[in-house]
Amino acid sequence: MRGARVIRRPLVAIPLSVLLLIVSGAAVASFPRSVLAFLLFQGAILFIYLAAMPGYLRAALLAVALLVMMPIIGAYNVYYLEIATQVGIFAALALGLNIVVGLAGLLDLGYVAFFAVGAYSWAIFGSPHANQIFGGGFPLAPGWFYLFIFVGLAVAALAGVLLGLPVLRLHGDYLAIVTLGFGEVIRVLANNLDKPINFTNGPKGITPINRPPVPFGLPYAEYSYFLVLLIVLVVIVVNRRLEDSHIGRAWEAIREDQVAAQAMGVPLVRAKLLAFACGASFAGVMGVVFAAKQVFINPESFTFLESIGVLAMVILGGMGSIPGAVLGATIVTVLNLQVLKGLSLWLNELKNAGVVILGYPLADLPTQLEPAKYERMIFGVILVVMMIFRPQGFLPARRRQREIEVTAEEHKTVTV
Amino acid sequence: MTRTLRIVSILLLAAAVAVVTVPMAGDAHGKGTIKVATQSPLSGGQAALGEGIKLGAQLAIDKLKGPLEKAGWKVELVPFDDQAKPDVGVANAKNIIADKDIMVVIGHLNSGVAIPSSEVYKEQTLAMISPANTNPTVTDRKLPNVSRVCGRDDVQGVVGSEFAKGQNAKSVYVIHDKTAYGQGIADFFKADAEKKGLKVIGFEGTEEKSNFDPILTPIKAKNPDLIYFGGIYDQGAPFFKQAREKGLKSKFMGPDGMDSSDLTKIAGKAVVGMYYTSAAGPASALPKAKSFVDEFKKKFSKNPEPYAAEAYDATAIALKAVEAAAKSGKVTREDVSAQIRKVKHSGITGDIEFDGKGDRKKALYFVLQVANEDPTKWGDNKIVKQLTIAPPAEKK
Amino acid sequence: MDVELLIGILPQVVIDGLILGFMYALIALGYTMVYGVLEFINFAHSEVFIFGAFVGVEIMLGLKSAGVLERFPWILVLVVVLLAGMLASALLAFTIERVAYRPLRHAPRLIPLISAIGVSFFLQDVIRLTESIWRNAFNLVYPTIESLNVRLEITETIDVSIKSLVVIVAALLMLWALHALVNRTKVGTAIRAVAEDQAAASLMGINVNRIISLTFVIGGAMGGAAGVLFGVQYGLINPYTGFIPGLKAFTAAVLGGIGNIPGAMLGGLVLGLLEAFAASYLSLLTGGAFGAEYKDIFAFSILILILIFRPKGLLGEVVRERA
């Protein structure tokens, strides 16, 4: 504890933060392929966020890390830029779902459907595919992409309202199953609507999808990182404002006690529909960005497991907490794309280098035990362990944390 | 908050120490290392096929790396799990291009992952040779770095319908698995069959893997002469098995996804007499195919999955191209990509030579018939017909 | 449109739907019982289900390689395999509860859900790892017992195989036994009491922990039985096979009214019939424009419709707002 208290002193924390940034930056520069070096950099960012220091200083340090250092790291190793971009995409998704699940308390198991709606809206019109529906004149010029960010937002929000309308009367897990069904319906539709009229090109997917024009001659990877970062920032600001607004309080009231909320004059229908629409719109925007980034999309990107993944991010981070959602998205994405992959690559290298462990040469390892095959198993264990030891999430919303402590206390007194 | 901060600090310290102390692998000896990466799903529902690709590549490297090692290079395989997900595939692809030793990628299983990932490889003209992506779009983009050993949907579907016509089948029922592969082939099969005057009395897709009863009921009532299943054996075998159990008497047919001894292991006598098209000939007729199956079994003690032979050929071509590029003493990715298009290779799946798009110039297709219900006798399957078909001429 | 054909296949479609429905009903019980006492979705139940199927196939393959599979009467084999599958799945469900859920008993409702997802990922790959080392295989095939495959012809176009009848009979027996257990025995009363109010039940001297373990054991056993029957009926399993039927069974449980045991049975049957109808008739009725690929959309649309008019499922209690 005492160590932590020392770090909480700004006089210690500020120089330490700067030092960490420099060290991690230097580490990535000298070992561009080392997964650990990049982890150190990610840790430095988290440290800056947590450590005690004046707000403007924190903002400045974060800006240096994200706006200056990250693109430079990307120049050393594009893979890390890709991870950062995907973290951003999933962070926006997690923030959107956080509104529905975390704030309004409506369990949504089909969230990825809205992502799909956004992605397909640009994929269809930003590729020659639309010619099959409308005759000619497509693809739209790359510049239309920026308009489609808003189209994607609107279409996804509309889909959110459409889903919300029939399910307003449902509670808890009845809602969960309907949203799950909705997610599957959207995916199966995308997979099947290649006949009678070819809207989505079915399982074959749509390609090539136009990318937006890039200013200043930036490489697209860098540009897409900045674009995603900008959107995530906007989403965070919107989330902040919503949370403290009239409607945000209405959502929390519904989450805590729907009957009481209604009695206090919270308009249930409007509040719930707004929650679905807001949550969906973030996913729609990211869908458009995702389609352009991938150049190709097909229904395989929008399965139920993706919805589950985003839900895991929200809950790991701490339900109802904005920094929690971002951190949850980071942890899950980094684990999946970087740490577990890095681990199995490292084991593979040891194997190829002929390392012997306890008299057993790794090269003799049967292919059944290939480490790359068991990444998901390890991920599963991590999920369980995290839930058991940190049920409130990593950065829980303050109110939520208090509640958990209180209920735990209550149960202690009952069972004793 | 305090506790979180403390934990974060400790982890950071550990990472910092580890960065400094964990030695970086990749010590240079000889001329350096050449890595061949595979990308295919190694976990999840499609893991069996994805692993087949990895094992095919591994066998090829172990067997054929001799000349390169003699020349002073170290040859390694780096397997990646793309989880059949496009976003994971793209992230892996970026990781792959960041590793300067990787000269070729053998992958993917899913066209949906291959297409966005190949856009990443393209940035560095890193060669990708696909063992399994039959979707025409893969090569129709004319990327200089993308080639494929497998046939195209629009070729194999035509082979199937050509043969069905010859069998005096008047009515056919087409089922597919709703994937880019299965539906792609089924679409072309249907279109060509109709052109040839066959009556397609049903065309349906299904993602179902176990229970085919409800789909079979109307098929049985319509009693087609031939049922074509566009898909992989793990779905096709239970389908055909349940069809025979239900008393259907139609002839069965499928694409190269059915080319696995597991087809008879699962469906037994139900599929004896069934036809399938494949670029890989039967072990009984072709000595190369036989020795491949034998070696595969010896090394991994199981039968090769459908795309293992293609992955083996793809890796063999890759190694040949690297050898050619290495003659200059230095291997570059551009060079390897260019060399691949020049390779002439006589592989397990026939003679391979690529055209300007990366398709095989001419694909030799066999129509085979399942001879025996015993899975160990899969190699006895008979060639009923051989067809040589070139990829469709370029559209202007 | 060929009306004669449409009517002609109707009985067959109903039979197919019922078989599938009973399978869903058995799996759905596991979801619904756990939900009844703990109010959370046990996502790992689909792996409990497929684990039963794997234990079943291992025993049958063992018997086969010992050469005794054909010699024993099939009823005996089936009963042994069923019991083994039930026991194994029950044990697994019990262990999962102790390890992954009990420490989270008082956490917010979504926390055990994520834990369950973790368990599900873990178990899928553990089964795969074990089978790949043990048999070097991914797909496992249930050995065929010829006498089970005999088909009874009812009419020229309609028939039903012995194994399908076995599935129906076994499912009915187990559903009846469960119904009796829950409604007529002391333990059953205790389960219902815990489902109603844990604190009050514990004040009445009921060992809540033990009852919760018991519901996992019963739900797991039903899942294991469903797994074995699934394998016998459809023949092919792999470590990821459980996922989709699990999801469908969960849907069935909700459709019937989650937490409600007769509801799970009814929901399973309704869902099974809906799917069979959609897969058989969609293509015929729309002239090929929509086919079997839309069966899930059809099933989910009906589900949403039903829930709009009965927000607590078919047999759920009439809306009771929590005060």
Image: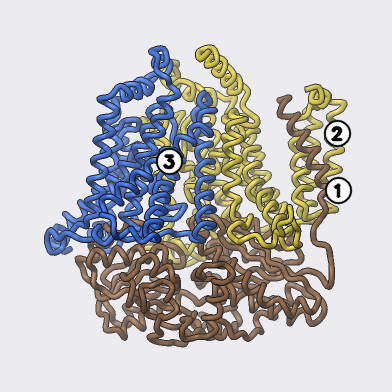
Residue at 33% over, 72% down: B271
Question: Which chain did the renderer colour blue?
Answer: C
Q: What is the chain letter for disc 2? A: A
- Badge 3 is on which residue? C45
Labels 1 and 2 share a subunit: yes
Q: Which amino acid does label 1 sit on?
A: Ala
Q: SS at mark 1? A: helix
Screen quadrant of the N terminus of chain A: top right
Q: Which mark sits nearer the N-terminus, 1 or 2?
A: 2
Q: Indicate which disc residue A16 carries.
A: 2
Question: Which chain did the renderer colour brown?
Answer: B
The 10 Å Cα crowd at callout 1, few under 14, some 14 to 19, many 20 or more, is some
- Horizontal and vertical percent for residue B12? 78, 38
- Horizontal and vertical percent for residue B131? 56, 72
Q: What is the chain letter for disc 1? A: A
Of residues C28 and A146, the one drawn nearer to the viewer in this rendering: C28
Please state if C279 lies on the left or on the right of A6 as rendered.
left
Please state if B8 lies on the left or on the right of B265 as rendered.
right
The 10 Å Cα crowd at callout 3, few under 14, some 14 to 19, many 20 or more, is many
- Badge 1 is on which residue? A26
Q: SS at mark 2? A: helix
- Horizontal and vertical percent for residue C154? 13, 58
Of residues C295 and C270, the one drawn nearer to the viewer in this rendering: C270
